[in-house]
Amino acid sequence: MKEEFLHYLWKYGLYDHDTLRDASGEKIVVVSPGEYNRDSGPDFFNARIITGGTQWAGNVEIHIKSSHFDQHGHNSDHAFDNVILHIVAENDRKVFNARGGEILTVAIGFDKGLYERYLDLVSKPCAIACQDDLDRIDKFFIRHWLHCLSVERLTEKSAAIEKILASTGNDWEETFYRMLSRYFGFRVNTQPFEMLAAALPFRIIRRHSDNRFQVEALLFGTAGMLEESLFKDAVNDDYYRKLVKEYRILATKYSLKPIHGWLWKFSRLRPVNFPTLRISQLAAMLATSGGLFSRVMETDDAGRLRQLFATEASEYWNTHFIFGRQSRQVRKSTGTLAADILLINAVIPVVFVYGRLRGLPAKCEKALGMLEDLPAEDNLITREWKEAGVSPESAFESQALLQLRNSYCRVRRCLDCRIGCRLVSMGKTFRESHNLTLEP
Protein backbone atom coordinates (compact mmCIF):
# COMPACT_ATOMS: atom_id res chain seq x y z
CA MET A 1 0.00 0.00 0.00
CA LYS A 2 1.23 3.51 -0.83
CA GLU A 3 0.34 6.51 1.30
CA GLU A 4 -0.31 8.68 -1.74
CA PHE A 5 -3.12 6.29 -2.67
CA LEU A 6 -4.81 6.89 0.68
CA HIS A 7 -4.45 10.64 0.08
CA TYR A 8 -6.22 10.14 -3.24
CA LEU A 9 -9.06 8.16 -1.62
CA TRP A 10 -9.57 10.78 1.06
CA LYS A 11 -9.32 13.79 -1.25
CA TYR A 12 -11.95 12.51 -3.66
CA GLY A 13 -14.13 10.55 -1.25
CA LEU A 14 -13.49 7.22 -2.97
CA TYR A 15 -13.44 5.12 0.22
CA ASP A 16 -16.25 3.10 1.82
CA HIS A 17 -18.02 5.81 3.83
CA ASP A 18 -19.71 3.24 6.08
CA THR A 19 -16.30 2.25 7.50
CA LEU A 20 -15.72 5.78 8.77
CA ARG A 21 -16.85 5.36 12.39
CA ASP A 22 -15.60 6.57 15.77
CA ALA A 23 -14.65 4.42 18.78
CA SER A 24 -18.29 4.03 19.80
CA GLY A 25 -19.29 2.84 16.35
CA GLU A 26 -21.10 6.04 15.42
CA LYS A 27 -20.74 7.11 11.81
CA ILE A 28 -18.44 10.06 11.08
CA VAL A 29 -19.82 12.54 8.55
CA VAL A 30 -17.25 14.34 6.42
CA VAL A 31 -18.42 17.89 5.73
CA SER A 32 -15.14 18.83 4.02
CA PRO A 33 -11.97 16.72 3.55
CA GLY A 34 -9.82 19.85 3.85
CA GLU A 35 -7.14 21.42 1.66
CA TYR A 36 -4.40 19.11 0.39
CA ASN A 37 -1.02 20.12 1.82
CA ARG A 38 2.22 19.17 0.04
CA ASP A 39 4.50 20.98 2.47
CA SER A 40 5.43 20.11 6.07
CA GLY A 41 2.63 19.59 8.57
CA PRO A 42 -0.61 17.58 8.41
CA ASP A 43 -1.73 16.21 5.05
CA PHE A 44 -5.03 18.11 4.91
CA PHE A 45 -5.74 21.50 6.46
CA ASN A 46 -9.08 22.95 7.55
CA ALA A 47 -11.16 19.78 7.34
CA ARG A 48 -14.60 19.56 8.94
CA ILE A 49 -16.26 16.44 10.30
CA ILE A 50 -19.30 15.65 12.45
CA THR A 51 -19.01 13.00 15.12
CA GLY A 52 -21.09 12.46 18.25
CA GLY A 53 -23.42 15.24 17.14
CA THR A 54 -20.58 17.81 17.24
CA GLN A 55 -18.92 19.44 14.24
CA TRP A 56 -15.13 19.59 14.46
CA ALA A 57 -12.78 21.75 12.40
CA GLY A 58 -9.09 21.00 12.12
CA ASN A 59 -6.53 18.94 10.22
CA VAL A 60 -6.37 15.38 8.91
CA GLU A 61 -3.25 13.21 8.89
CA ILE A 62 -2.93 10.03 6.82
CA HIS A 63 -0.62 7.01 7.24
CA ILE A 64 -0.51 3.38 6.15
CA LYS A 65 -0.37 2.28 9.80
CA SER A 66 -1.42 4.34 12.81
CA SER A 67 1.94 3.57 14.48
CA HIS A 68 3.64 5.60 11.75
CA PHE A 69 2.33 8.72 13.50
CA ASP A 70 4.85 8.13 16.29
CA GLN A 71 7.56 6.82 13.98
CA HIS A 72 7.46 10.10 12.05
CA GLY A 73 7.76 12.11 15.24
CA HIS A 74 4.32 13.73 15.00
CA ASN A 75 3.54 12.82 18.63
CA SER A 76 6.10 15.39 19.78
CA ASP A 77 5.38 18.01 17.12
CA HIS A 78 2.89 20.71 18.14
CA ALA A 79 2.13 21.34 14.46
CA PHE A 80 -0.04 18.19 14.71
CA ASP A 81 -1.94 19.22 17.85
CA ASN A 82 -4.94 20.28 15.79
CA VAL A 83 -5.33 16.93 14.00
CA ILE A 84 -8.97 15.94 14.44
CA LEU A 85 -8.83 12.72 12.42
CA HIS A 86 -6.12 10.18 11.64
CA ILE A 87 -6.92 8.10 8.52
CA VAL A 88 -5.06 4.80 8.11
CA ALA A 89 -5.20 1.53 6.23
CA GLU A 90 -4.30 -0.41 9.40
CA ASN A 91 -5.10 0.78 12.92
CA ASP A 92 -2.40 -0.98 14.95
CA ARG A 93 -1.96 1.48 17.84
CA LYS A 94 -3.59 4.38 19.65
CA VAL A 95 -1.81 7.67 19.01
CA PHE A 96 -1.56 10.89 20.99
CA ASN A 97 -0.55 14.43 20.10
CA ALA A 98 2.21 16.47 21.79
CA ARG A 99 -0.28 17.67 24.43
CA GLY A 100 -1.17 14.10 25.38
CA GLY A 101 -4.61 14.07 23.78
CA GLU A 102 -5.71 10.92 21.96
CA ILE A 103 -6.32 11.38 18.25
CA LEU A 104 -9.38 9.82 16.64
CA THR A 105 -7.94 7.14 14.32
CA VAL A 106 -9.99 5.28 11.70
CA ALA A 107 -9.07 2.50 9.28
CA ILE A 108 -11.02 3.10 6.08
CA GLY A 109 -12.21 0.49 3.63
CA PHE A 110 -12.16 0.85 -0.14
CA ASP A 111 -12.67 -0.98 -3.39
CA LYS A 112 -9.54 -3.07 -3.92
CA GLY A 113 -10.08 -2.73 -7.65
CA LEU A 114 -9.10 0.92 -7.38
CA TYR A 115 -5.72 0.00 -5.94
CA GLU A 116 -5.19 -2.68 -8.57
CA ARG A 117 -5.91 -0.17 -11.36
CA TYR A 118 -3.53 2.32 -9.74
CA LEU A 119 -0.71 -0.24 -9.48
CA ASP A 120 -1.33 -1.37 -13.05
CA LEU A 121 -1.08 2.22 -14.26
CA VAL A 122 2.10 3.27 -12.44
CA SER A 123 3.88 0.01 -13.28
CA LYS A 124 3.50 0.42 -17.06
CA PRO A 125 6.98 0.36 -18.67
CA CYS A 126 6.17 2.98 -21.33
CA ALA A 127 7.09 6.66 -20.92
CA ILE A 128 3.42 7.70 -20.88
CA ALA A 129 1.76 5.21 -18.56
CA CYS A 130 -1.78 5.84 -19.81
CA GLN A 131 -1.00 5.98 -23.54
CA ASP A 132 -3.07 2.89 -24.33
CA ASP A 133 -6.09 4.22 -22.40
CA LEU A 134 -6.24 7.84 -23.53
CA ASP A 135 -9.01 7.07 -26.02
CA ARG A 136 -11.27 6.39 -23.01
CA ILE A 137 -10.96 10.02 -21.89
CA ASP A 138 -13.11 12.81 -23.32
CA LYS A 139 -11.02 15.13 -25.53
CA PHE A 140 -12.52 18.25 -23.95
CA PHE A 141 -11.45 16.97 -20.54
CA ILE A 142 -7.87 16.51 -21.76
CA ARG A 143 -7.78 19.99 -23.35
CA HIS A 144 -8.98 21.58 -20.13
CA TRP A 145 -6.27 19.78 -18.16
CA LEU A 146 -3.66 20.96 -20.69
CA HIS A 147 -4.80 24.55 -20.12
CA CYS A 148 -4.15 24.16 -16.39
CA LEU A 149 -0.75 22.54 -17.02
CA SER A 150 0.40 25.34 -19.32
CA VAL A 151 -0.39 27.92 -16.65
CA GLU A 152 1.34 25.69 -14.08
CA ARG A 153 4.47 25.59 -16.24
CA LEU A 154 4.49 29.36 -16.61
CA THR A 155 4.03 29.71 -12.86
CA GLU A 156 7.00 27.43 -12.17
CA LYS A 157 9.16 29.45 -14.56
CA SER A 158 7.98 32.56 -12.73
CA ALA A 159 9.79 31.44 -9.57
CA ALA A 160 13.15 31.36 -11.39
CA ILE A 161 12.51 34.75 -12.97
CA GLU A 162 11.52 36.30 -9.64
CA LYS A 163 14.72 34.97 -8.11
CA ILE A 164 16.79 36.65 -10.83
CA LEU A 165 14.75 39.83 -10.47
CA ALA A 166 15.43 39.96 -6.73
CA SER A 167 19.17 39.39 -7.27
CA THR A 168 19.31 42.30 -9.75
CA GLY A 169 17.55 44.78 -7.47
CA ASN A 170 14.29 44.55 -9.46
CA ASP A 171 16.02 45.52 -12.70
CA TRP A 172 13.69 44.20 -15.42
CA GLU A 173 16.10 44.86 -18.29
CA GLU A 174 18.89 42.95 -16.55
CA THR A 175 16.50 40.11 -15.70
CA PHE A 176 15.28 39.90 -19.28
CA TYR A 177 18.86 39.93 -20.58
CA ARG A 178 19.83 37.04 -18.30
CA MET A 179 16.80 34.96 -19.27
CA LEU A 180 17.39 35.61 -22.96
CA SER A 181 21.07 34.71 -22.65
CA ARG A 182 20.25 31.49 -20.81
CA TYR A 183 18.08 30.18 -23.62
CA PHE A 184 20.53 31.27 -26.31
CA GLY A 185 22.51 28.28 -25.09
CA PHE A 186 19.79 26.01 -26.48
CA ARG A 187 20.37 23.42 -23.75
CA VAL A 188 23.94 22.40 -24.65
CA ASN A 189 25.52 25.75 -23.75
CA THR A 190 22.99 26.97 -21.23
CA GLN A 191 25.46 27.14 -18.34
CA PRO A 192 28.21 29.17 -20.06
CA PHE A 193 25.62 31.60 -21.43
CA GLU A 194 24.27 32.07 -17.90
CA MET A 195 27.81 32.67 -16.63
CA LEU A 196 28.47 35.13 -19.45
CA ALA A 197 25.37 37.17 -18.60
CA ALA A 198 26.31 37.21 -14.91
CA ALA A 199 29.89 38.34 -15.71
CA LEU A 200 28.81 41.06 -18.16
CA PRO A 201 26.02 43.26 -16.69
CA PHE A 202 23.48 44.59 -19.14
CA ARG A 203 24.10 48.19 -18.03
CA ILE A 204 27.50 47.95 -19.71
CA ILE A 205 26.04 46.58 -22.93
CA ARG A 206 23.38 49.29 -22.89
CA ARG A 207 26.07 51.99 -22.99
CA HIS A 208 27.34 50.55 -26.27
CA SER A 209 24.06 49.39 -27.82
CA ASP A 210 24.52 51.81 -30.72
CA ASN A 211 27.74 50.02 -31.74
CA ARG A 212 27.27 46.39 -32.63
CA PHE A 213 30.99 45.73 -32.98
CA GLN A 214 31.62 46.88 -29.42
CA VAL A 215 28.76 44.72 -28.15
CA GLU A 216 30.31 41.74 -29.93
CA ALA A 217 33.71 42.55 -28.43
CA LEU A 218 32.18 42.71 -24.95
CA LEU A 219 30.37 39.40 -25.39
CA PHE A 220 33.15 37.44 -27.10
CA GLY A 221 35.77 38.79 -24.73
CA THR A 222 33.83 38.12 -21.53
CA ALA A 223 32.90 34.69 -22.92
CA GLY A 224 36.61 33.85 -22.91
CA MET A 225 36.56 33.25 -26.68
CA LEU A 226 39.34 35.74 -27.32
CA GLU A 227 41.89 33.69 -25.39
CA GLU A 228 44.91 33.07 -27.61
CA SER A 229 44.96 29.31 -27.11
CA LEU A 230 41.29 28.68 -27.89
CA PHE A 231 41.31 29.09 -31.68
CA LYS A 232 44.73 28.23 -33.09
CA ASP A 233 43.89 29.57 -36.58
CA ALA A 234 42.72 32.97 -35.28
CA VAL A 235 46.15 34.53 -34.70
CA ASN A 236 46.32 36.08 -38.18
CA ASP A 237 42.58 36.79 -38.46
CA ASP A 238 42.01 40.53 -38.85
CA TYR A 239 38.48 40.56 -37.40
CA TYR A 240 39.60 38.51 -34.41
CA ARG A 241 42.54 40.85 -33.72
CA LYS A 242 40.25 43.89 -33.84
CA LEU A 243 37.89 42.25 -31.32
CA VAL A 244 40.83 41.48 -29.00
CA LYS A 245 42.06 45.07 -29.17
CA GLU A 246 38.59 46.52 -28.54
CA TYR A 247 37.88 44.17 -25.67
CA ARG A 248 41.13 44.97 -23.89
CA ILE A 249 40.11 48.63 -23.83
CA LEU A 250 36.57 47.90 -22.62
CA ALA A 251 37.66 45.26 -20.10
CA THR A 252 40.06 47.75 -18.52
CA LYS A 253 37.40 50.45 -18.47
CA TYR A 254 34.79 48.25 -16.76
CA SER A 255 37.08 45.86 -14.84
CA LEU A 256 35.65 42.84 -16.66
CA LYS A 257 36.87 39.32 -15.99
CA PRO A 258 36.26 36.69 -18.70
CA ILE A 259 34.86 33.26 -17.95
CA HIS A 260 36.90 30.27 -19.11
CA GLY A 261 36.67 29.74 -22.87
CA TRP A 262 36.88 25.96 -22.51
CA LEU A 263 33.42 25.94 -20.95
CA TRP A 264 31.83 26.32 -24.38
CA LYS A 265 30.79 23.14 -26.16
CA PHE A 266 31.26 22.71 -29.91
CA SER A 267 31.38 18.93 -30.31
CA ARG A 268 28.27 17.12 -31.52
CA LEU A 269 26.69 20.43 -32.52
CA ARG A 270 25.75 21.36 -36.04
CA PRO A 271 28.01 24.26 -37.11
CA VAL A 272 25.00 26.61 -37.36
CA ASN A 273 24.48 26.06 -33.63
CA PHE A 274 28.07 26.83 -32.61
CA PRO A 275 28.22 29.24 -29.66
CA THR A 276 30.37 31.64 -31.75
CA LEU A 277 27.41 32.23 -34.07
CA ARG A 278 24.93 32.37 -31.20
CA ILE A 279 26.95 35.06 -29.43
CA SER A 280 27.06 37.18 -32.58
CA GLN A 281 23.29 36.75 -33.00
CA LEU A 282 22.76 37.71 -29.36
CA ALA A 283 24.85 40.83 -29.96
CA ALA A 284 22.56 41.75 -32.85
CA MET A 285 19.53 41.57 -30.56
CA LEU A 286 21.13 43.52 -27.74
CA ALA A 287 22.40 46.26 -30.08
CA THR A 288 18.83 47.49 -30.50
CA SER A 289 17.93 51.15 -30.36
CA GLY A 290 15.33 51.93 -27.74
CA GLY A 291 16.12 48.79 -25.74
CA LEU A 292 15.02 45.23 -26.45
CA PHE A 293 12.93 44.82 -23.30
CA SER A 294 10.88 47.97 -23.95
CA ARG A 295 10.18 46.84 -27.52
CA VAL A 296 9.02 43.45 -26.23
CA MET A 297 6.64 45.08 -23.76
CA GLU A 298 5.22 47.35 -26.45
CA THR A 299 4.57 44.51 -28.90
CA ASP A 300 1.35 42.50 -28.63
CA ASP A 301 1.71 40.38 -31.75
CA ALA A 302 3.65 37.09 -31.65
CA GLY A 303 4.51 37.42 -35.34
CA ARG A 304 6.16 40.80 -34.87
CA LEU A 305 8.08 39.49 -31.87
CA ARG A 306 9.28 36.56 -33.92
CA GLN A 307 10.74 39.00 -36.46
CA LEU A 308 12.45 40.89 -33.65
CA PHE A 309 14.23 37.72 -32.48
CA ALA A 310 15.02 36.32 -35.92
CA THR A 311 18.40 38.05 -36.26
CA GLU A 312 21.56 37.40 -38.26
CA ALA A 313 25.16 37.05 -37.15
CA SER A 314 27.50 39.80 -38.32
CA GLU A 315 28.95 39.73 -41.82
CA TYR A 316 32.18 38.03 -40.73
CA TRP A 317 30.23 34.92 -39.77
CA ASN A 318 28.78 34.54 -43.26
CA THR A 319 32.08 32.86 -44.14
CA HIS A 320 33.10 31.48 -40.74
CA PHE A 321 31.84 29.13 -38.04
CA ILE A 322 34.80 29.65 -35.72
CA PHE A 323 37.48 32.33 -35.56
CA GLY A 324 40.24 32.10 -38.19
CA ARG A 325 38.83 29.30 -40.32
CA GLN A 326 36.89 30.14 -43.47
CA SER A 327 33.88 28.18 -44.70
CA ARG A 328 31.54 28.43 -47.64
CA GLN A 329 29.40 31.55 -47.59
CA VAL A 330 26.10 31.12 -45.74
CA ARG A 331 24.02 33.74 -43.96
CA LYS A 332 23.87 32.71 -40.29
CA SER A 333 20.43 33.70 -38.93
CA THR A 334 18.67 32.41 -35.84
CA GLY A 335 15.75 31.21 -37.94
CA THR A 336 12.09 30.91 -37.09
CA LEU A 337 12.49 27.77 -34.98
CA ALA A 338 15.18 29.30 -32.76
CA ALA A 339 13.18 32.53 -32.45
CA ASP A 340 10.15 30.53 -31.30
CA ILE A 341 12.27 28.73 -28.67
CA LEU A 342 13.41 32.10 -27.31
CA LEU A 343 9.85 33.45 -27.28
CA ILE A 344 8.41 30.40 -25.55
CA ASN A 345 11.09 29.94 -22.92
CA ALA A 346 12.40 33.44 -22.18
CA VAL A 347 10.30 36.26 -23.61
CA ILE A 348 6.76 35.11 -22.83
CA PRO A 349 7.53 33.96 -19.24
CA VAL A 350 9.10 37.37 -18.45
CA VAL A 351 6.05 39.18 -19.88
CA PHE A 352 3.81 36.93 -17.76
CA VAL A 353 5.75 37.62 -14.55
CA TYR A 354 5.93 41.34 -15.29
CA GLY A 355 2.15 41.50 -15.64
CA ARG A 356 1.54 39.44 -12.51
CA LEU A 357 3.93 41.39 -10.28
CA ARG A 358 2.84 44.78 -11.61
CA GLY A 359 -0.86 43.98 -11.26
CA LEU A 360 -1.41 44.13 -15.02
CA PRO A 361 -3.66 41.17 -15.92
CA ALA A 362 -3.72 42.30 -19.56
CA LYS A 363 0.02 41.52 -19.78
CA CYS A 364 -0.58 38.03 -18.39
CA GLU A 365 -3.33 37.48 -20.94
CA LYS A 366 -0.98 38.81 -23.62
CA ALA A 367 1.61 36.18 -22.64
CA LEU A 368 -0.93 33.35 -22.75
CA GLY A 369 -2.32 34.64 -26.04
CA MET A 370 1.11 34.68 -27.65
CA LEU A 371 1.67 31.06 -26.62
CA GLU A 372 -1.61 30.18 -28.31
CA ASP A 373 -0.55 32.06 -31.46
CA LEU A 374 2.79 30.25 -31.79
CA PRO A 375 2.96 26.83 -33.48
CA ALA A 376 3.36 23.73 -31.35
CA GLU A 377 6.92 22.62 -30.62
CA ASP A 378 8.26 19.58 -32.40
CA ASN A 379 10.51 17.53 -30.13
CA LEU A 380 10.85 14.02 -28.75
CA ILE A 381 8.23 14.56 -26.05
CA THR A 382 5.58 16.11 -28.29
CA ARG A 383 6.14 13.29 -30.79
CA GLU A 384 5.55 10.77 -27.98
CA TRP A 385 2.24 12.44 -27.21
CA LYS A 386 1.24 12.46 -30.88
CA GLU A 387 1.83 8.71 -31.03
CA ALA A 388 -0.37 8.38 -27.93
CA GLY A 389 -3.14 10.30 -29.69
CA VAL A 390 -2.72 13.81 -28.23
CA SER A 391 -1.52 16.34 -30.80
CA PRO A 392 -0.83 19.87 -29.53
CA GLU A 393 -2.49 22.61 -31.53
CA SER A 394 -0.21 25.43 -30.35
CA ALA A 395 2.84 26.21 -28.21
CA PHE A 396 0.38 26.72 -25.34
CA GLU A 397 -0.51 23.02 -25.53
CA SER A 398 2.97 21.71 -26.35
CA GLN A 399 4.28 23.47 -23.23
CA ALA A 400 1.51 21.76 -21.26
CA LEU A 401 2.52 18.37 -22.64
CA LEU A 402 6.15 19.00 -21.66
CA GLN A 403 4.97 19.82 -18.14
CA LEU A 404 2.79 16.71 -18.02
CA ARG A 405 5.54 14.42 -19.29
CA ASN A 406 8.35 15.80 -17.10
CA SER A 407 6.52 16.62 -13.86
CA TYR A 408 3.89 13.87 -13.81
CA CYS A 409 4.51 10.95 -16.19
CA ARG A 410 8.25 10.70 -15.60
CA VAL A 411 7.85 10.36 -11.82
CA ARG A 412 4.51 8.52 -12.08
CA ARG A 413 2.43 11.17 -10.31
CA CYS A 414 -0.65 9.59 -11.88
CA LEU A 415 -2.85 10.37 -8.89
CA ASP A 416 -1.97 14.06 -9.18
CA CYS A 417 -2.83 14.02 -12.87
CA ARG A 418 -6.47 14.52 -13.79
CA ILE A 419 -6.19 11.95 -16.58
CA GLY A 420 -4.69 9.38 -14.20
CA CYS A 421 -7.34 10.10 -11.56
CA ARG A 422 -10.07 9.60 -14.15
CA LEU A 423 -8.67 6.28 -15.34
CA VAL A 424 -8.15 4.86 -11.83
CA SER A 425 -11.61 5.91 -10.66
CA MET A 426 -13.64 4.84 -13.71
CA GLY A 427 -17.20 4.14 -12.55
CA LYS A 428 -16.81 6.00 -9.24
CA THR A 429 -18.04 9.46 -8.24
CA PHE A 430 -15.65 12.11 -7.01
CA ARG A 431 -16.57 14.15 -3.96
CA GLU A 432 -14.91 17.24 -5.44
CA SER A 433 -16.04 16.98 -9.03
CA HIS A 434 -15.76 20.77 -9.48
CA ASN A 435 -11.99 20.43 -9.28
CA LEU A 436 -11.97 18.04 -12.20
CA THR A 437 -14.39 19.83 -14.52
CA LEU A 438 -16.23 16.64 -15.48
CA GLU A 439 -17.58 13.72 -13.49
CA PRO A 440 -15.51 10.54 -13.99
Image (cartoon, rainbow, N blue to C red):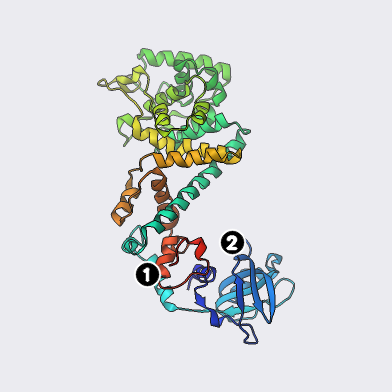
The mark that comes first in sequence, 2 or 1, is: 2
| Residue at (36, 57) in percent of width and height | 139
Q: Secondary structure at mark 1?
A: helix
Residues 6 and 253: in front is 6
| Residue that extends furthest to the right in the rendered view of this protein | 99
Q: Quadrant of residue 361?
A: top right
Residue matched to label 2: 37
Question: Does 253 appear above or below 19?
Answer: above
Looking at the image, how many numbered discs can be counted on the residues?
2
Q: Give the percent coordinates (x, y) of residue 273.
A: 34, 31
Question: Does 305 appear above or below 432?
Answer: above
Q: Secondary structure at mark 2?
A: loop
| Residue at (51, 76) in percent of width and height | 15
| Residue at (31, 63) in percent of width and height | 132
Q: Give the percent coordinates (x, y) of residue 389.
A: 30, 56
Question: Does 418 appear above or below 261?
Answer: below
Q: Give the percent coordinates (x, y) of residue 400.
A: 42, 49
Quadrant where the C terminus sits is bottom left
For label 2, count other residues whose C-alpha is less than 10 Å away and answer few (under 14), some (14-19) or many (20+): few
Q: Which mark is residue 306?
A: none
For label 1, count other residues whose C-alpha is less than 10 Å away and answer few (under 14), some (14-19) or many (20+): few
Q: Is residue 206 visible?
A: yes
Residue type at numbered disc 2: Asn
| Residue that extends furthest to the left in the rendered view of this protein | 328
Q: Is residue 265 visible?
A: no
Residue type at numbered disc 1: Asp
| Left or right of residue 241, residue 178 in this image | right
Residues 37 and 242: in front is 37
Q: Give the percent coordinates (x, y) of residue 44.
A: 60, 66
Residue matched to label 1: 120
| Left or right of residue 185, residue 68 in this image | right
| Residue at mark 2 to residue at mark 1: CA–CA distance | 26 Å
